[in-house]
Amino acid sequence: MMTPSGPTTVKHLNRLKLGADGMQNLTIFGLLVVLIIVASIIEPKFLGMQNISNVLMQISSIVIVSSVITMVLNTGNLDLSVGGVGAMAGVLYAVFARAGLSVPLSATLAILSGGIIGLSNGLIISSFRIPSFIVTIATMYIARGIAFIGAEGSVITSGLPGDFSNLGEEFLGPVPIPLIYALGFILLFIFMQNKTVLGKMAYAIGANIKTSDYSGISVRKVVTSIYTLAGLAAAFAGVVVSARFNQADCRILPGFEIDVVIASVLGGTNINGGRGTVVGMLIGALILGILTNVLNMMGLILYYQYVVKGVLLVIAIVYNNAMRKAIRI
Amino acid sequence: MIKVPKIQINRRVIQNLVLLLVLIFLIVFFTIQNPRFLSSRNLFNIPRQILPVVIMGCAMTFIINSGAIDLSVGGLMALSAISFGKFVTLGVNPWLAVVLALLVGVIVGSISTLFIHGLKLPPIMATMATWVMSSGTAYALIRAIPITDVRMKPIFVLNTLKFFDDKVPLALFIIIGVVIIFLFLEKKTIIGKYTIAMGGNENAAKFSGINIARMRWLIFILCGIMASFSGVWAVSRIGSADPNIGLGMEFQVIAGCILGGVSIKGGDGTITGMLIGTVLLFILINGMNMMGFNPYYQQVATGIVILIAVMINYFVGQRGKKMAARTA
């Protein structure tokens, strides 16, 4: 009794020589193209230079952080602290700059403070093998709390030096500098994922932590360094956002942890670890950014966008799992 | 030999006793700092403030024990508060509206379970999705403007009703009632044992004939009802249906559970421990409040407390495992 079932499809797709990652990237790229076409039909303004630059600016911080978060997810962990860390770094940047430190020094210190949070995340998670979400939720509240304390619950606008905003407002030719940062992060992490041992080890740990341990990978070192990178990147994003608006708001990057997860998962990153690429994440982030932009232009109330994001998160994970089930190479 | 179960019980009792000692120490410390801390006014106010955290903590203990987590409680509180307000403005009898709001909790709990068991999402992601969805709907339904309506007035009695010389608030009796019900569920029904079994080893639980999906559904519905009631309760306290109700509540609830020795990995935790942990955390925050700390420091303090509690649970768990291995 043979029923048409899984094995035949797998064989058929095997012949195509396209892995699950490739297949996923291809389909979501198709989705992106469809989305762009639909958006430009609904809203002629969509393809204007101004709007495109807006969308790219909006996703630049998501891309910066998601590059690292993709690696965190690869190891089978989560980092929910990124939004809080970003806010904390932005506020600390302003606090240091207001106190009279030079702008580059205060930016460095703020970014390093994010690194410290990331480092402690990584150390606690990998040393005690505690589920990552609870540790990073706790550090999210700690970091967000520090941001609230630093900005006294509101926004730091006055007393900032004139060159405070240089980090986020400059242009390189016609291109705004945050986009250059985002591009830099993407290239760096594509390199990290494909050409460095750290990237391969991250995949290995996510696929099977026990075998990685037995084959001599220092899980603690790898996880800790990736979390530190995530903290640094989140802090960098926070500093750039604060510089761009020329003020430090303790409420910046709300719901950021969900956005970065959506971008990564849409791009084919397995939420349970072991799979996922930075290239896919970029397409995922573009989809997220364009969808938000279109909903905005169509006049949907801001709050419904949270609902849309929730649905998107569910669909992304379900689609991802289905893809992995259908294609096993 | 026969000693194994004895050690298990001892470990829990010791942990609870240590927590109780810390609690007493904190109470003494805060009373010395500020004598008003032990005034009957403050003491009888505590049940009214702590009610949402305790009753949601009861259900959350089951959920964490079963190896899952529910992040949606805060968003759900807001959603049921808003739907209660909406129903009342539509002319529904306020008490009927309370029941309908509880129904919202049942629905959201069911959706979470559907995501986890139907669509195979990890519980953290599933409930994060229901969290943003319910919180987003709550804001969107009323465009972030709180509902105030005279017709909501009848339910304010939940907050204002007091017994025994107008002193003991109704909240205390609700808390005691809910805790007794949950203790009964934990000790005398299969829910308590099955959730522990699921958290310990989900596959083993499945193969020994536990209907995991149905059990999860049950406890998520319980949690949904508790969160919805907390939402309505918050409306009766602040007098309007505000979408900011429940902001950050999931964190407090989970923190209380973890502090009370509920293992975040599942399979280990008691209602009694949760109760002590929640009260301990609340006393800490309330005491810091009375000492005049900026409320933002409480966030940081709660975060640090969670980190410490998670690590203590880890060490206690390791020790318990070693002791069990030695005597076995």
Image (tube, coloured by chain):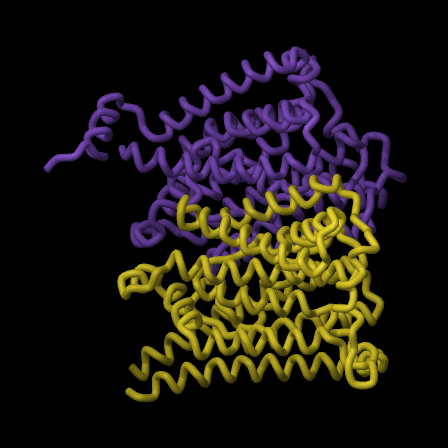
Residue A259 spot, x, y in % from top left: 58, 37
Front position in the image: B125 or A86: B125
Side (left or right) of A68 relative to A42: left
Q: Is residue A183 above or below residue A328?
A: above
Residue A171 spot, x, y in % from top left: 72, 19
Q: Quadrant of residue B161?
A: bottom right
Q: Residue at x 82, y 82 (%)?
A: B40
Q: Residue at x 61, y 77 (%)?
A: B177
Side (left or right) of B24 relative to B147: left
Extreme right residue here?
A: A159
Q: Colour of chain B?
A: yellow
Residue B9 spot, x, y in % from top left: 44, 83
Residue B179 spot, x, y in % from top left: 58, 75
Quarter of the C terminus of chain A within the rendering? top left
> Can I make out residue B247 in this image?
no
Side (left or right) of B173 relative to B126: right
Q: Is residue B147 above or below residue B258?
A: above
| Chain letter, colour purple in render | A
Q: Is residue B137 above or below residue B23?
A: above
Q: Residue at x 35, y 33 (%)?
A: A323
Give the total number of marks visible in the rendering: 0
Front position in the image: A33 or B93: B93
Q: Quadrant of residue B190?
A: bottom left
Side (left or right) of A228 relative to B152: left
Quarter of the N terminus of chain A within the rendering? top left
Q: Residue at x 66, y 65 (%)?
A: B52
Front position in the image: B259 or A152: B259
> Can I make out residue B298 in this image?
yes
Front position in the image: A307 or A131: A307
